[in-house]
């Protein structure tokens, strides 16, 4: 299992990973490099006909693994909560137009209220948009975010919490996304991966690395192999559940965004083969 | 309970909080401001007769709440693990000389090995130094550190893990330190505080705040009230266990270290009264 990665058939790259490229440029280069999957961030769709963009990606033989991202449900202000619901409905429409069957949710947090209140609003927000997701044939993946993002980005900070919420919502259209960057430190990670696998709730798997030192809370993620995350071990836990989806490379990095992106793509493919 | 904090009888400040001051200057100003407790970082004792320093602090009517910090047990290299044991024995001697009955442990992590292996080495390291601590009458507090420090600073990242380890070591000389900065995001925090209280394992309580945004992973902690941590609520959970020790202000901040420290001390006292 550990040595199959020179085969790129399960390599997916997020558009934000090569942020300087627009989606057309990314697709052309990903495809030429043998990458088989792409996860599209919504900003990459700005000003485009989304159905045409979906066709363009499929013409490059790219599987559109997911649309990133919905979520950001919690707000002290009820009007803002309603606006978030509307935005998530738009994301569902966009996913359907693009031709992907998955949206990743960065659930949100409002520091003006308790984390518990934000968690309730996340639950209620997902419950509200769930019928629209089901009607569109689009699944929703709750992504637990690292506790350092609990202030404003997500009140769901462990895979246990994401599993709890997915199970409480109890729908084939809601599951979780596991990102090694957010979860690697957690001593219950293996057990919680097994749990979401057993419940058919493991919808996506994201990889990158934790650099030492990390110099920015958001924009200093590392290439696989550059840091201390036991990526191969976590992948083995994920695959033990029967997961056979894509390994999605999601890197936010001021450092790499400054580099020549063709060179960076070569580094991604090499790091994927050697350290994932 | 929420309005007693203008009384400073339970306010302790860590020497590192006012890092530009040496320990003598800190003691003079803390005492003049009505602060009643001090936690001494080991670097503040460099080049000093430790017993004399302890007397100096007591002459200022300061309770010496703890010595900060022991720990850093895990290393792939056995010789380094032995050196860490020796260093922790020295810390125990220093604590006894200083006249404090508590050492806070930042347990350590070695990214060259698994977190589980680091956790075993932390357990074994504490077990090894425990007889020395007991003989010296010095307690050891396991401080869980925020998951963003799991790479090199601590493989103990939740209060549940710290409680598990303290209970496994099963000694009146081992307990935990709860720092709001490291633990506020955890949805099991109230329950785990209750648990360590019931087991007489709650040895220390540290406060500061989580700024939004936080611009540095280590050196951008906020004054109480500047961020999103529900400090009063967490303190109420701590006090519900019967804890009546000090509220220790531990702030690492490049921003505040650049300020006039007398002015900063005034801000600490005000923030303590209003937001703790």
Image (cartoon, coloured by chain):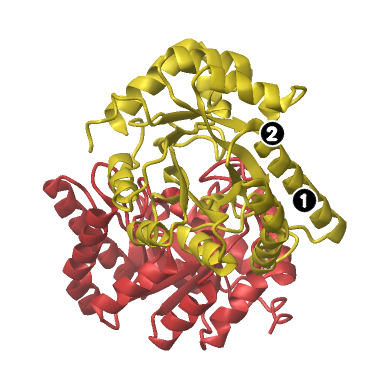
Chain colours: A yellow, B red
The answer for which chain carries disc 2 is A
| Badges 2 and 1, same chain | yes
Return the x and y of residue B60 as percentages of the image width and height. Answer: 54, 71
Return the x and y of residue B26 as percentages of the image width and height. Answer: 55, 58
Residue A146, compared with residue A232, is above or below; it is: below
Q: Which residue, given by chain and number where applicable, does mark 1 sit on?
A: A84
Return the x and y of residue A45 as percentages of the image width and height. Answer: 70, 26
Return the x and y of residue B130 as percentages of the image width and height. Answer: 21, 72
Comparing B25 with B93, the one in front is: B93
Q: CA distance from mark 2 to mark 1?
A: 20 Å
Q: Which residue, given by chain and number where applicable, does mark 2 sit on?
A: A97
Asked whether the viewer can see residue B139, the reply is: no
At horizontal 52% and vertical 44% (from top left) the residue drawn is B217
At horizontal 64% and vertical 49% (from top left) the residue drawn is A153
Residue A227, compared with residue B101, is above or below; it is: above
Residue B218, compared with residue A188, is above or below; it is: above
Q: Residues within 10 Å of mark 1 (few under 14, many from 20)?
A: some
- Is label 2 in a helix, a strand or a loop? helix
Q: Residues within 10 Å of mark 2 (few under 14, many from 20)?
A: some
At horizontal 46% and vertical 58% (from top left) the residue drawn is A159
Residue A100: which disc? none
Q: Is residue B15 left or right of residue B236?
A: left
The answer for which chain carries disc 1 is A
């Amino acid at each position: 299992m550990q040595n199959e990665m020179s085969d790129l058939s399960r390599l997916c790259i997020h558009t934000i990973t090569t942020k300087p490229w627009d989606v057309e440029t990314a697709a052309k280069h990903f495809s030429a490099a043998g990458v088989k999957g792409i996860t599209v961030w919504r900003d990459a769709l700005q000003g485009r006909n989304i159905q045409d963009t979906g066709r363009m990606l499929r013409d490059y033989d790219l599987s559109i693994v997911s649309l990133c991202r919905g979520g950001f449900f919690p707000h002290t202000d009820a009007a803002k909560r309603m606006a978030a619901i509307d935005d998530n409905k738009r994301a569902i429409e966009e996913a359907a137009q693009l031709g992907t069957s998955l949206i990743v949710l960065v659930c949100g947090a409002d520091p003006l209220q308790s984390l518990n209140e934000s968690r309730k609003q996340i639950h209620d927000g997902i419950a509200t948009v769930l019928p629209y997701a089901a009607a569109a044939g689009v699944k929703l993946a709750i992504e637990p975010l690292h506790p350092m993002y609990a202030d404003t980005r997500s009140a769901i900070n462990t895979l246990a919490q994401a599993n709890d919420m997915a199970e409480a919502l109890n729908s084939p259209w809601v599951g979780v996304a596991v990102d090694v960057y957010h979860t690697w430190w957690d001593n219950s990670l293996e057990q919680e991966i097994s749990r979401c696998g057993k419940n058919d709730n493991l919808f996506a798997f994201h990889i990158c690395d934790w650099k030492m030192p990390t110099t920015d809370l958001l924009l200093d993620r590392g290439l696989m192999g550059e840091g201390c995350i036991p990526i191969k071990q976590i992948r083995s836990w994920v695959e033990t559940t029967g997961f056979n989806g894509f390994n999605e490379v999601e890197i936010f990095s001021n450092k790499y965004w400054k580099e020549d992106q063709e060179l960076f793509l070569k580094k991604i493919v090499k790091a994927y083969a050697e350290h994932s």
